[in-house]
Amino acid sequence: MSIDFKEIINQVKENQNKLNSCIKHDFSIDITPEKKLDKRYRCINCNGEVSSIEKY
Ligand SMILES: [Zn+2]
């Protein structure tokens, strides 16, 4: 397992922890304004990130 791969796994886990501990998500922050597809959003309450598919 490469370091890069571990790093990605850690980030995913960290993001999941943030999302799980959030009381109420508000995905108002568009972190991929340049994209039309494959967009990602950030919750203003927990800073967790989701794809546009997970958002709904
Ligand atoms: Zn949240």
Image: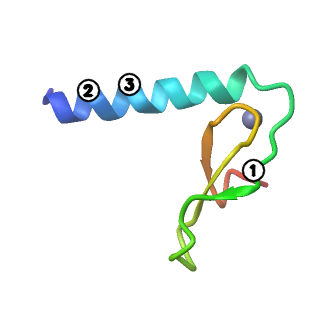
| Distance between the alpha carbons at the discs numbered 2 and 3 | 6 Å
Which type of secondary structure does the marked residue at label 3 adopt? helix
Residue extending furthest left? 2
Is residue 43 found left or right of 3 in the rendered image?
right
> How busy is the neighbourhood of tag 3: few (under 14 within 10 Å), some, or many (20 plus)?
few
Residue 20 at x, y percent in the picture: 70, 23
Q: How is the image coloured?
A: rainbow
Residue 13 at x, y percent in the picture: 48, 25
| Distance between the alpha carbons at the discs numbered 1 and 3 | 22 Å
The residue beneath circle 3 is 10
Residue 46 figure quarter: top right
> How busy is the neighbourhood of tag 2: few (under 14 within 10 Å), some, or many (20 plus)?
few
> Which quarter of the frame holds ligand 1?
top right
Q: Nearer the viewer, mark 1 or mark 3?
A: 1
Q: Is residue 31 above or below residue 1?
A: below
The residue beneath circle 1 is 27
Q: Nearer the viewer, mark 2 or mark 1?
A: 1
Task: Name the amino acid type tagged 1.
Answer: Phe
Task: Name the amino acid type tagged 2.
Answer: Lys
Which type of secondary structure does the marked residue at label 2 adopt? helix
The residue beneath circle 2 is 6
